Image: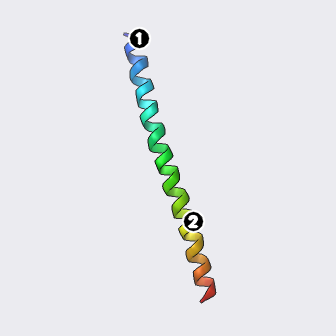
Amino acid sequence: MYKKLKRKKHLYNKKSRRILRIYRMKRRILARHRIGFMMFQQLQ
């Protein structure tokens, strides 16, 4: 019973880690776009 629970938790952590990585990448891209947009506004 305990081993089964542990395995399930590990799989969940692996999945959530992948989601976190994708989320971080998206945030980084959004931040980059935001900085570019702010610079573009300053130029005008």
Name the side, left or right, on which 39 lies relative to 22. Answer: right
Q: For the point 50% across and 45% down, which residue is it? A: 21
Q: For the point 41% across and 27% down, which residue is it? A: 11
Type of amino acid at the residue the image marks with label 2: Arg
Q: For the point 63% across and 86% down, which residue is it? A: 43
Q: Observer-nearest residue: 9 or 33? A: 33
Residue mark closest to the camera, 2 vs 1 = 2
Image height of 1 relative to 18, above or below: above
**Quadrant hosting residue 39:** bottom right
Q: Pointer 1: residues within 10 angstroms few (<14), some, or many (20+)?
A: few
Image quadrant holding the C terminus, namely bottom right
Type of amino acid at the residue the image marks with label 1: Tyr
Residue 12 x, y percent position in the rendering: 41, 30
Image height of 43 relative to 33, above or below: below
Q: Name the residue carrying label 1.
A: 2
Q: Pointer 2: residues within 10 angstroms few (<14), some, or many (20+)?
A: few
Query: Which element type, helix, strand or loop, lies under badge 2?
Result: helix
State which tag comes first along the sequence, 2 or 1.
Answer: 1
Cα distance in 3D space between marks 2 and 1: 45 Å
Name the side, left or right, on which 15 lies relative to 24. Answer: left
Query: Which element type, helix, strand or loop, lies under badge 1?
Result: helix
Q: In the rendering, which numbered label is found on residue 42?
A: none
Q: In the rendering, which numbered label is found on residue 32?
A: 2
The extreme bottom residue here reads 44
Image quadrant holding the N terminus, namely top left
The extreme top residue here reads 1
Q: For the point 47% across and 48% down, which residue is it? A: 22
Residue 14 x, y percent position in the rendering: 45, 32
Colour scheme in use: rainbow
**Quadrant hosting residue 16:** top left
